[in-house]
Image (cartoon, coloured by chain):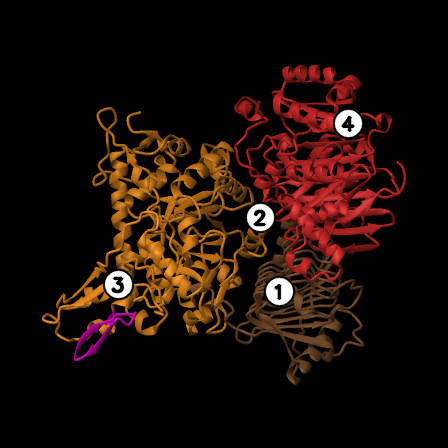
């Protein structure tokens, strides 16, 4: 049963059947030493690039924010109403051992109006369920999240990773950050996003970051290959229901890295593939064969169109541009901190004197990795 | 015999920390129209559209990182930035000078028709796209470091100079150098391979006019961006020009 | 082997008994069809059926017929498709063409009928009663605050810059370079007289036309030709040309032959060089970049209204919403039937969607988001008559733009050879011996006659509709009915079938 059938009844799902381009502002920071930072920093950074968004979507993801529940999946779920919540909780109880649940703390805000019910659940899959399905925990959770998002009316799981969380809403990024009281969370990685969507306002789920497990993606651009990327992913059981093209980015990272075990840098070479002109001219025959094979096998995973993305995951953060760099992306470092953003001013607001500032090349990822345990 | 009262150069400093661009630009515009000679903007970080469309003979000094589209459609002023700049510097600029004492971002000098943009450090992608010259208006962009892909794309006139100084890891320029070029000249100091060049572009030998022009231009550049260019000689530059002024002559069937 | 396998499309016949050998045909033909060897001779292979010779022959001695050469019928591989292949096999390249889409795609305007009042509601007589066509283009606030100052009311909200039109018909952008300076002069003179506006197109504005600034929209296209601070301030609004209905997604190319001294100085490029407009604006790769350019232009012009011209493509509704939210005051929708001086035929004929659909979905999208008043919508691309004007307004347009119709009024026969620069009517050419033929005052008079005639007809229809102000028709789909359209098209247009 497709979510689209519930469309008009639920104000959070004003669906038109067109995909929605994601134009916007991005910022991200990671402490490779694992030092925690308050969410205040990322909010300040997003405030400077306020004009890249139009107030119809903003969001953040923080990593390392739930140290006391680090082993459980932290599900952030938004509900249209109590009925949806009840239906969803019944399903959760059935499939998962829910250790605790609570409302996500928010601050009243003039700028963020008409919020849905916002809850979080710390849970693990029931062992008898995973045994019966034959799936590993992560796959089990992906399937459950897909199922909830496509079949339970008025419900949307917007974060499903461990010891991390996505916080998003309709509003300017800095207002969303204050609404969710992010200054009270401490994370070693923060990514932020301010959106300039062109769909009907009121779709909280359409804001970025987009998440599956511990992947959080913020995206600036429009994926002109969306139609085929979507069909490719559907072959592997990913349901692209959210009508935002960022969805395919997150699923592609999950597929290539978690399922196919490709190294991060190679996954980036699939999404932002080198040109044939350059592959042909490559003197290193091993590399040449590798890139040629990647393009042959993963042709439908090539992401075309302008994009700049920042991706957060449990052990790091990466920034990546499309292969002809049609969207801006700037990086900077200071001590163990790596910053990536759409504009240098967003970085300089929170890091006035970086050690180094540079612009990454097209298709070349900027990667920050945690050095030790956190 | 009388004494002509020398008009004292009028300089105004504005603390623009946290100021929204609209307010700040209105102040700048009013001061410029009023005949102010120099406007210093302190604490700038990310404010957009500074000096856009300004035609007054004014000098604007920016302390901080200006936002996008600095000096777009500008026609006359001099802008000095004592930090890095972002994207869109000198967009469709007609005359004047912009000096960046740091790096600059993407799409510098798009559609520029005159004036000069000097960047001390690196520049990003798509620098000098569709620059055009007209009569005695020759737009010039000089970058001290390296540039990304599509340098001089679609160029129709003007001069682009790339020095390759500083930490240049990898090539001094990216791919698709001068792709679609049909006018103007690019001077690159550093290694470039044929693989990087657009199909309309070829290397030509330097002549004495080029050497003279480069010497003078580089001296002006070094002074403005406050860089030491000892060791940089005109003969180290490669000259790139289109070898056809009608690159699209064979595209159509009638 | 034979070179040219393509046979003449038209045959030119001179009746030598009537011909008085005045040689006017030789003088008038821009394509070199005629010559004189003891008698007037014609090379039919060059004829484009522009009828200049026919109109100017004092003896009506010339006829032009379609070459009756028989081809075996094949509705799939029709003759034009065969000819295109012969041409390309001989001269490799993209087939170029001019003016608008000439394939028999469904014309939705021709399947919409207009209502009239009867019995239950009186129609209005436009000859005797006031009928208002005045239109304002630009952003309007959501509401107004009015203060009561001791019994006297005072407006307390600033409305912002708008363009005033005396009739909802304006002239679409056609670049000086693709059309002659006399064409631009005629359009400017007519726009001023009619109380409407013309658009410079992407070739800049000739200095001589600066006095008409209150009736000109200056265009900032991807090539930025002739764009400088003074130019930006020489019109009532600035239009960012993102796309064009005739050639969505691609750029433009004015060959060096058409860049003479005046075109060169207006576009500010050297004579004889090609004027290449890149496909995208290289500073607009995403919606927030458009917003950036819109505000850069606003800052550079003291906040004049900014229009954004787009070609109608599949997701035009979402794009339009983005444009409105990016700060534009006007959105110009150019349908797939829009004209051009030159475009590859494959793009002109197969890319884009109909204006009627785009208009309906954009209007609906903006209304559903509650932001319809943020922008005015101009509809263009194959507006052929006052009936089309009325229907476009009913579907949601604030005003319509005419390009092809304006040129036809000045003599154009739509022979589709604009790209050759040999226009015998002196319109789409820069050859001085041809451009001199179009007298700007004569051209202006014909444009004024056309627009006044259509305005009269629009008033007549409004009267029949029982409406005496054009804003009551705007977006009023209820006054249209569809005849012979399928279910989903009617649904998308939000127009009921006749009978309901």
Q: Chain of mark 1?
A: B
Name the residue carrying label 1: B128
Q: Quadrant of the N terminus of chain A?
A: top right
- C82 or B86, nearer to the observer: C82
Chain letter of disc 4?
Answer: A
Q: Which chain is orange?
A: C
Residue topped by disc 3: C442
- Spatial CA span between label 4 and label 1: 53 Å
- Which quadrant of the figure contains the C terminus of chain A? top right
Residue A207's spot in the image, x, y percent?
A: 65, 35
Q: SS class of the residue under badge 1? A: loop
Q: CA distance from mark 1 to mark 2?
A: 21 Å
Colour brown, chain: B
Query: Where does the magenta region start and end?
Result: C28-43
Which quadrant holds residue A140?
top right
C257, C125: nearer the viewer = C257
């Amino acid at each position: 049963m497709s979510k689209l059938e519930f469309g008009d009844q639920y104000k959070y799902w004003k669906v038109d059947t067109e995909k929605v381009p994601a134009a916007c502002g991005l910022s991200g920071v990671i402490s490779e030493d694992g030092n925690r930072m308050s969410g205040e920093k990322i909010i300040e950074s997003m405030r400077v690039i306020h004009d890249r968004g139009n107030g119809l979507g903003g969001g953040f993801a923080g990593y390392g924010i739930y140290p006391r529940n680090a082993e459980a999946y932290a599900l952030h779920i938004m509900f249209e109403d109590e009925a949806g919540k009840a239906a969803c909780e019944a399903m959760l109880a059935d499939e998962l051992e829910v250790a605790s649940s609570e409302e996500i703390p928010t601050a009243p805000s003039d700028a963020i109006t008409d919020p849905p019910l916002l809850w979080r659940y710390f849970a693990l899959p029931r062992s008898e369920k995973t045994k019966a399905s034959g799936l590993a925990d992560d796959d089990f959770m992906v399937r459950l999240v897909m199922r909830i998002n496509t079949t339970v009316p008025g419900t949307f799981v917007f974060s499903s990773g461990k010891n991390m969380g996505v916080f998003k809403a309709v509003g300017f990024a800095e207002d969303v950050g204050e609404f969710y009281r992010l200054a009270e969370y401490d994370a070693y990685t923060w990514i932020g996003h301010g959106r300039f969507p062109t769909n009907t306002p009121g779709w909280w789920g359409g804001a970025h970051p987009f998440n599956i497990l511990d992947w959080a993606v913020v995206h600036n651009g429009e994926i002109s290959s969306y139609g085929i990327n979507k069909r490719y992913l559907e072959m592997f059981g990913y349901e692209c229901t959210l009508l935002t093209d960022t969805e395919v980015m997150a699923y592609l990272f999950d597929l290539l890295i978690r399922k196919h075990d490709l190294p991060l840098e190679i996954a980036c070479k699939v999404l932002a593939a080198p040109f044939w002109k350059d592959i042909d001219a490559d003197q290193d025959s091993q590399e040449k064969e590798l890139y040629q094979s990647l393009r042959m096998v993963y042709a439908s995973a090539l992401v075309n169109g302008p994009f700049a993305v920042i991706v957060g995951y449990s052990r790091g953060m990466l920034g990546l541009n499309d292969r002809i760099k049609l969207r801006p992306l700037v990086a900077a470092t200071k001590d163990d901190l790596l910053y990536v953003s759409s504009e240098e001013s967003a970085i300089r607001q929170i890091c006035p004197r970086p050690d180094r500032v540079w612009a990454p090349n097209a298709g070349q990822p900027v990667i920050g990795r945690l050095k030790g345990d956190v | 015999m009388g004494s002509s009262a020398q008009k004292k150069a009028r300089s105004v400093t504005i603390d623009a920390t946290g100021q929204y661009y609209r307010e700040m630009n209105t102040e700048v515009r009013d001061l410029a129209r009023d005949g102010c000679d120099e406007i210093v903007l302190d604490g700038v970080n990310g404010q957009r559209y500074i000096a856009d469309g300004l035609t007054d003979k004014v000098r604007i000094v920016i302390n901080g990182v200006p936002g996008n589209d600095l000096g777009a459609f500008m026609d006359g002023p001099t802008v000095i930035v004592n930090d890095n700049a972002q994207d869109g510097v000198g967009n469709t600029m007609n005359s004047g000078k912009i000096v960046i004492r740091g790096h600059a971002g993407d799409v510098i000098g798009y559609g520029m028709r005159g004036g000069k943009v000097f960047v001390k450090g690196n520049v990003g992608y798509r620098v000098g796209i569709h620059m055009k010259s007209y009569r005695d208006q020759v737009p010039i962009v000089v970058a001290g470091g390296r540039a990304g892909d599509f340098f001089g794309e679609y160029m129709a006139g003007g001069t682009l100079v790339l020095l390759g100084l500083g930490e240049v890891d990898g090539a001094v320029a990216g791919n698709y150098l001068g792709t679609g070029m049909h006018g103007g000249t690019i001077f690159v100091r550093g290694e470039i391979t044929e693989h990087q060049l657009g199909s309309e572009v070829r290397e030509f030998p330097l002549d004495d006019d080029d050497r003279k022009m480069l010497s003078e231009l580089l001296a002006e550049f070094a002074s403005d961006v406050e860089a030491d260019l000892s060791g940089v000689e005109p003969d180290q530059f490669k000259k790139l020009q289109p070898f056809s002024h009608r690159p699209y002559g064979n595209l159509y069937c009638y | 082997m034979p070179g040219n396998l393509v046979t003449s499309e038209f045959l030119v016949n001179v009746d030598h008994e009537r011909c008085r050998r005045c040689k006017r045909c030789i003088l008038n033909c821009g394509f070199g069809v005629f010559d004189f060897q003891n008698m007037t001779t014609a090379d039919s292979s060059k004829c484009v059926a522009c009828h200049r010779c026919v109109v100017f022959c004092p003896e009506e001695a010339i006829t032009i017929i379609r070459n009756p050469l028989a081809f075996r019928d094949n509705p799939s591989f029709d003759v034009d498709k065969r000819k295109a292949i012969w041409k390309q096999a001989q001269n490799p390249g993209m087939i170029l063409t001019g003016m608008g889409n000439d394939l028999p795609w469904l014309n939705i305007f021709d399947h919409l009928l207009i209502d009239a009042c009867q019995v239950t509601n009186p129609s209005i007589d436009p000859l005797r009663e006031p009928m208002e066509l005045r239109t304002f283009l630009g952003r309007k606030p959501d509401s107004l605050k009015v203060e009561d100052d001791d019994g006297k009311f005072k407006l307390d909200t600033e409305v912002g810059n708008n363009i005033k039109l005396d009739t909802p018909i304006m002239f679409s952008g056609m670049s000086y370079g693709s059309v002659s300076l006399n064409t631009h002069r005629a359009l400017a003179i007519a726009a001023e007289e009619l109380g409407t506006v013309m658009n410079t197109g992407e070739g800049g504005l000739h200095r001589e036309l600066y006095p008409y600034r209150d009736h000109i929209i200056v265009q900032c296209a991807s090539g930025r030709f002739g764009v400088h601070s003074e130019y930006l301030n020489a019109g009532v609004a600035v239009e960012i040309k993102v796309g064009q209905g005739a050639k969505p997604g691609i750029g433009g190319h004015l060959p060096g032959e058409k860049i003479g001294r005046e075109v060169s100085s207006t576009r500010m490029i050297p004579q004889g060089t090609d004027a290449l407009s890149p496909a995208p604006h290289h500073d607009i790769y995403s919606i927030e970049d458009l917003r950036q350019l819109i505000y850069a232009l606003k800052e550079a012009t003291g906040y004049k209204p900014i229009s954004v011209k787009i070609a109608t493509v599949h997701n035009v509704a979402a794009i339009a919403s983005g444009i409105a939210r990016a700060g534009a005051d006007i959105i110009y929708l150019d349908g797939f039937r829009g004209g051009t001086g030159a475009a590859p035929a494959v793009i002109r004929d197969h890319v884009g969607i109909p204006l009627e659909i785009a208009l309906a979905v954009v209007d609906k999208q903006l209304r559903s988001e509650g932001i319809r008043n943020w922008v005015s919508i101009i509809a263009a691309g194959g507006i052929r008559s006052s009936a089309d004007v009325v229907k476009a307004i009913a579907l949601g347009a604030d005003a319509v733009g005419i390009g092809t119709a304006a040129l036809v009024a000045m003599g154009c026969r739509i022979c589709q050879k604009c790209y050759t620069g040999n226009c015998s009517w002196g319109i789409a050419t820069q050859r001085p011996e041809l451009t001199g033929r179009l007298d700007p005052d004569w051209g202006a008079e014909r444009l004024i006659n056309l627009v006044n005639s259509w305005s009269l007809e629009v008033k007549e229809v409004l009267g029949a509709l029982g409406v005496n102000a054009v804003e009551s028709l705007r977006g009023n789909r209820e006054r249209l009915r569809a005849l012979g359209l399928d279910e989903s098209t009617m649904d998308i247009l939000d127009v009921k079938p006749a009978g309901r």
